[in-house]
Amino acid sequence: MSSLGRASALLGAGTLVSRVTGLVRTIVLVAAIGSISKAGDAFGVANQLPNNVFTIIQTGILTAVIIPQIVKAGAHKDGGRAYISKLFTLGTVVFLAATAVAILLAPWLVFIYAKGYSPDQLALATAFAYWCLPQIFFYGLYALIGETLNAKRVFGPYTWAPIVNNVVSIIGFLIFIAMFGNDRNLVEMWDPTMIAVLGGTATLGIALQAGLLLFSWRRTGLRLRPDFRWRGVGLRHVGTLAGWTFLMVIAGQLAGLVQSTVVSESTGHPSVFFMQAAWLVFMLPYSIFAISIGTPYFTQIAEHASEGRHDDVRSDVARCIRIISLFVVGSGIALAVAAVPATRIFTTTAEQAVQAAPVLICYLVGLLPLALLFIVQRAFYAYGDTRTPFYFTLVQVALIIGLSVIAGAVAPIEQLAAAIALGQSVAGIVQTIVAIWILRNRLGGLELPQTLLSLVRFAISAVPAGLAGWGVYNLLGAGSGWIVGHSGSDFLDRILGAVGTGVIGLASVIVYVVVLLILRAPELSAATRMLRRFLPGR
């Protein structure tokens, strides 16, 4: 448990710094191109394309298949060196091929995701795409190296490396502003040099992020060499496992395509780029807690599953669910009541922040289910079962598509993005319930009575915490006070929004913890031990 605590603390610290610098990166980017703008949406679509392809590669193959396989390969006489060399050679070839195909198809990919755009906006998005799509190769290498490090229990570098990307991007975007000015929100403002500087900066950051991980490779104790003899890599077995996850991610991408197509009709209002910004804020508690705590647990679960220690797997999953829930519920309610100042960070005016805050709140409805799904889904992967996650993901995909279409038909154009975000959260809730029910039957239990009691305690504590945060929000002036910025300086207004978010969030978290102490929640002890790992000398 202590090693898991240290690993989680290391990952949590790295994720926190990464997400904070990521927020600064987005603030500078918004200053350059605007958040609710046609140029911003054009860049948003183009820069999202490599992420979509990367998601197919990472979630469809690497996370679901590679970690369990590398854990098993570690039992080989050479510690898995030959297997991993074959794997890296194959992966590099696949990433290069995927990047080349995506670049060739760039105009069609942009058109598919942005049917509601004008010809000029489509042309700008396509120009950005040519600069952004090479990120696919570097994302792939970053994930392959990082997942191997995680499988070898070298947890820190994979989480800390994105900080380099953020710093490089911040510098590049500031250079862009110095060269061309800020708030380039109109399509006709852009020329090839501007496009190259902005798109090239985004891709350079990802390339350096991948390269940085190579400096940590020595800690794995493995030596790599190119090996094109792929017969020994077990392609048939890996292909069977990856086939289901590949289909699962493709289905998810189809749902995302429907969402993007529907919301592209609202360009000029909260739309594609702002949804990405809201998602970045939403992912802050998810990444800091769900991923940081769940990633070391996944490696341990994979080891226990490989050894046939099913009771330990059941305990690992249940314990991880309770600890993640403790943090996610508290941070989620704090962020929800601070939604207006939080969205002010990414909008141009206080009025836009009030209009756009519902997008973030609707995403937050699905925060806890998404966090729990992270570990539940990986429990199936640990047993080499990728087919079952495909089936319960189909439930989510069908709901997302159906609810997105309904949102496009009935939601006001200015709240279309919020309606789509809410549909995604509802679909995630249903998916997670189905997944937990199946896993419980598979493992013969998940300590559900104890876990449900913990969730009830967290929910009870969240109510006064939310009320406290809402009270502070109103005391500070609500939607018209300094917390959403009325200083006359756009940059200062964004900083004030961040400060307001912190003040409101801190009030909520303090009340949340106090109520949990009154309820004598046993999870607080485990959380306290984990947080102590952040302190020097621990």
Image (cartoon, rainbow, N blue to C red):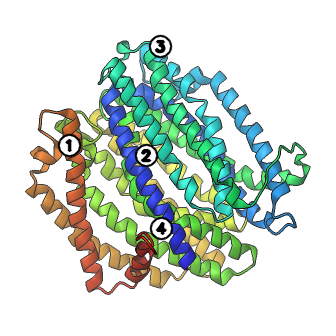
**Residue 436 percent coordinates (x, y):** 54, 70
Q: For marks 1 and 2, give the one nearer the viewer.
A: 1
The residue identified by callout 1 is 354
Which label number is shown at residue 403? Answer: 2
The residue identified by callout 4 is 9
Q: For marks 1 and 4, give the one nearer the viewer.
A: 4
Given the current orientation, which residue lies at the most extreme front position?
Answer: 537
Mark 2, residues whose alpha carbon is within 10 Å: few (<14), some, or many (≥20)? many
N-term mark: 1 or 4 = 4
Disc 1 element = helix
The residue identified by callout 3 is 192
Disc 3 element = helix
Amino acid type of the residue that numbered disc 1 sits on in the rendered structure: Val
State left or right for residue 89 relative to residue 130. Answer: right
Question: How far is disc 4 from disc 2 in space, using C-alphas?
Answer: 38 Å
Q: Is residue 480 above or below residue 186?
A: below
N-term mark: 3 or 2 = 3
Position of the N terminus, as image quadrant, is bottom right
Question: How far is disc 4 from disc 3 in space, using C-alphas?
Answer: 44 Å
**Residue 320 percent coordinates (x, y):** 51, 73
N-term mark: 4 or 2 = 4
